[in-house]
């Protein structure tokens, strides 16, 4: 970590010791002019990294918060209300620095939240950028993973990992035999996604997520794996555990450039996972918009102009507030001609999905201009006819 120059300006956002002369630049507590090239949090601290903490909430025990700041000015924010939100809400966007270089503001995706940037911490500010007058330590996110220890050190490797969804094609043990536990059924393949310092897995029984790092020797180390709590058939639940245990043991990465790219993960016992990469929608189309959509239990008759099929999903839009509660009136039911990537519809099961919506700049004649990608299964219910 770089040593920070301790001057009045580095604490200005907390103590208010910066003022401005009329028509002039900033001045310090003694009225001395501060040079324009003075060190600030932005240029003197190693601020990129992952910050975590539980922020206060007016009507709940707290909001579990994880904020990753990247050197390119982008961020990933994960929030979860502890008493009523079963899974965290993850959004991504851009942040900007204030004129003094000591505080950041998240864009509209992050609701414009502001933080003062200090040595190893972010202090949540009021909406107008002023500090909390109570000095409460509960409004602080602490640095838990600086940039030097996050996967960004992997350079082009990490970028390739993040730009693709990785479908598990094969799992073999050290003797070349198929690992049955990790491959319960051909139609239920695991898919791995890398984002920031997090690894996300779906395809088995539950959605799983954990932190990951790539060390200097090119070894993938996964830790803190957690999952949703659905109950499934024993084979799928066992597959989740088997894959989680295998990844937690540490696996060597071997990336074979495509197209499509292939990822080989090899354990110390020579167990080998082979995965094929498919470019993510973000890599293809740029940032998406997060929406919520309810999918009816039964498909409906339609004349799909995209593929000529006679059955379509029946959907309607839903709205949620910042606390994860349903608000407003649901939209009208309508047939959905496009597919939802990553979503498998089961007749008789109603679902509420969190979806990323993307717009293609120039779609082929036989393809939709709007692309929907499943981000999270919010609700799932079996409906009797």
Image (cartoon, rainbow, N blue to C red):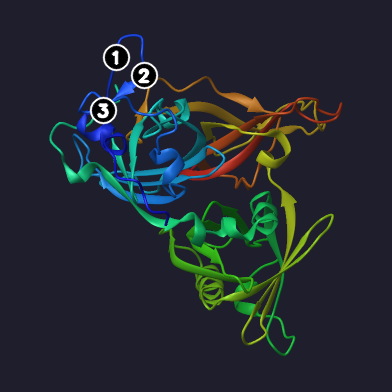
Q: Is residue 225 visible?
A: yes
Given residues 347 and 112, the one toward you in this image is: 112
Decide: few, some or many residues near mark 3? Use Cα within 10 Å; few <14, some 14-19, many ≥20.
some
Measured along the vertical axis of the image, is residue 29 above or below residue 11?
above
Which residue extends farthest front? 32
Check residue 21 in the rendering and tell me which mark sits there, or answer none. 1
Which residue extends farthest left? 134
Percent from the top left, x then y, of residue 63? 28, 43
Per the image, label 3 sits on a secondary structure element best described as: loop
Check residue 28 in the rendering and tell me which mark sits there, or answer none. 3
What residue does disc 2 label? 25
- For the N terminus, the image quarter is bottom left
Residue drawn 67% across the image and 34% down it = 286
Residue drawn 65% across the image and 31% down it = 358
Measured along the vertical axis of the image, is residue 142 above or below residue 326?
below
Decide: few, some or many residues near mark 2? Use Cα within 10 Å; few <14, some 14-19, many ≥20.
few
Image side of residue 35 versus residue 8, left or right: right
Percent from the top left, x then y, of residue 301? 70, 29
């Amino acid at each position: 970590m770089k040593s920070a120059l301790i001057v009045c300006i580095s604490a200005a956002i907390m103590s208010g010791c910066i003022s401005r002369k009329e028509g002039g630049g900033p001045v310090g507590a003694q009225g001395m002019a501060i040079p324009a090239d003075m060190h600030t949090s932005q240029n003197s601290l190693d601020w990129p990294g992952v910050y975590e903490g539980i922020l206060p909430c007016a009507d709940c025990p707290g909001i579990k918060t994880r904020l990753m700041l990247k050197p390119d000015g982008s961020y990933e924010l994960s929030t979860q209300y502890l008493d009523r939100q079963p899974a965290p809400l993850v959004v991504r966007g851009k942040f900007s620095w204030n004129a003094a270089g000591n505080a950041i503001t998240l864009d509209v995706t992050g609701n414009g939240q502001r933080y003062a940037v200090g040595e190893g911490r972010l202090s949540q500010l009021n909406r107008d950028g002023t500090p909390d007058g109570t000095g409460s330590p509960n409004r602080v996110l602490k640095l838990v993973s600086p940039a030097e220890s996050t996967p960004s050190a992997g350079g082009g490797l990490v970028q390739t990992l993040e730009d693709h969804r990785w479908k598990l094609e094969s799992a073999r043990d050290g003797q070349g035999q198929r690992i049955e536990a990790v491959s319960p059924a051909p139609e239920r393949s695991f898919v791995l996604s890398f984002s920031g310092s997090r690894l996300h897995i779906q395809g088995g029984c539950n959605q799983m997520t954990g932190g990951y790092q790539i060390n200097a020797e090119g070894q993938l180390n996964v830790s803190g794996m957690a999952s949703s709590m659905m109950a499934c058939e024993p084979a799928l639940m066992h597959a989740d555990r088997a894959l989680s245990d295998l990844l937690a043991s540490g696996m060597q990465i071997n990336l074979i450039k495509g197209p499509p790219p292939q990822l080989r993960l090899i354990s110390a016992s020579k167990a080998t996972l082979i995965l094929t990469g498919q470019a993510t929608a973000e890599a293809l189309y740029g940032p998406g918009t997060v929406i919520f959509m309810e999918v009816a239990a039964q498909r409906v008759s339609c004349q799909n102009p995209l593929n000529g099929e006679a059955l379509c999903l029946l959907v309607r839009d839903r709205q949620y507030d910042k606390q994860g509660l349903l608000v407003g009136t649901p939209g009208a039911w309508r047939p959905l001609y496009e597919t939802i990537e990553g979503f498998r519809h089961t007749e008789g099961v109603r679902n509420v999905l969190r979806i990323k919506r993307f717009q293609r700049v120039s779609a082929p004649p036989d393809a939709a201009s709007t692309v929907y990608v499943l981000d999270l299964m919010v609700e799932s219910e079996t409906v009797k006819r």
